Image (cartoon, grey):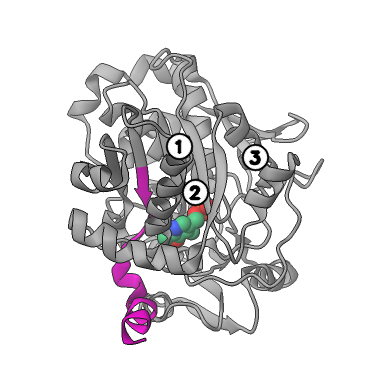
Amino acid sequence: MGFLTDLTCTRCGRAYPKDRLWNLSPCCEAPLFARYDLEGAMGELKRERLAERMPTMWRYAEVLPVEREDYRVSLGEGFTPLLQVTSLGQQVGAPKLYMKDEGNNPTGSFKARGLSVAVSRACELGARAVAIPSAGNAGGATAAYAARAGMRAHIFMPRDVPRANRVECEVLGAHVELVDGLITDCGRIVAGRKDREGWFDVSTLKEPYRVEGKKTMGYELAEQFDWDLPEVVIYPTGGGTGLIGMWKAFDEMEQMGWIGSKRPRMVSVQAAGCAPIVRAFEAGAASAEPWEGAETAAAGLRVPRAVGDFLMLRAIRESGGCAVAVSDEELMACVWEMASATGIFPAPEGAANLAGLKGLVKQGLVSPDERVVVFNTGSGLKYIDVISGVMLQ
Ligand SMILES: *Cc1c(COP(=O)(O)O)cnc(C)c1O
């Protein structure tokens, strides 16, 4: 069952068999991508018949890597609403504005998509324990799906992670360790201990399947726009998995004849206190240098070094998009502005997109007739301590 054929190295294209657990490619230490028999998948997965399927990301199961349905570890993730947010759009000069509300996912963020697939596939291939470094939401999602699967979860978080993320992990039964440092320091600890402890490392893009879960945002965008993709997608990037995943989804859909060659311009928004991708984009570089002294209240954006940096930069450039930085002051103000104009209480990362959009409109990089989608990647409720801290000031 399933149409997964093999995995390929994103640097050199070398193929690896699908039926064992992999982290980075042994050849280049680069992310591995899942490859499918798309001809075969097309025979069962019909664009016209999607409406008959369940309203979760598993409606695209033929292009997901889990082979046996009973290994699907699901809490009902994906197929989130695409909301028209016209009055907010009018306020900022982009009246054809939409918000894809990922705060609606289990555990309150889009991390649910990736971890549902990664935990499912790890379980299918025999892993009994997973480990992850997390700046916030990835930890909660790992804890939830591991609990659902009956697996152990070991989560390493910076000590100053938003409180809800830590409490959530503990309540869900995960082993949590707080680290004096950043997500990259947490990642080093996982890498150093995983073999000895028998953990499977589900760090983003260091295993092949979280990006498969996140790519379903691209499938949903196409489906919800009736197969005519919007002109601009604005996405807050940390590790960049969602942006890279959507870019992969667009390719797969084109190969299946679902969409044409037209692509949205992909815009990466980062916090000014941690903007390695923006710096690399502006320098015309193919990869990003690690960011020193990373600092931002948008925890999901506090990623000083991303293993998929070159994939992100490539997708942004191929799409004709760009990478922009916004200050914490701007993005926090946008939490209020976005919430009161839309009825959705966004995560600071989601609000950062609004700050980014304002800059693009001002510079004439987005015109009023274009359809623009901002991804609210999580619920503001997970950041109550951070956001109420700003209110008290
Ligand atoms: C993790 C996270 C991000 C960054 O996502 P990537 O796909 O890794 O770039 C953005 N927003 C929120 C709320 C997150 O939890």
Pinpoint residue 273: horizontal percent, then vertical percent: 59, 66
Label of residue 187 in the image? none
Q: Please tell me whether mark 3 sits on a helix, a strand or a loop.
A: helix
State the residue at coordinates (22%, 37%). 54
Amino acid at the residue labelled 2: Glu
Q: Secondary structure at mark 1?
A: loop
Q: Position of residue 49 (x, y in %)?
A: 23, 20
For marks 2 and 3, the one nearer the N-term is 2
Judge whether residue 14 can be spotted in this image. Answer: yes
Q: Earlier in the sequence, mark 2 or mark 1?
A: 1
The residue carrying mark 2 is 124
Nearest to viewer (mark 2 / mark 3): 3
* Magenta portion: prevailing SS class: helix
Q: Is residue 104 placed above or below 265 in the rendered structure?
A: below
- Magenta-highlighted residues: 374-393
Pointer 2 and pointer 1: residues touching (CB < 8 Å)?
Answer: yes
Q: Closer to the camera, 157 or 87?
A: 87
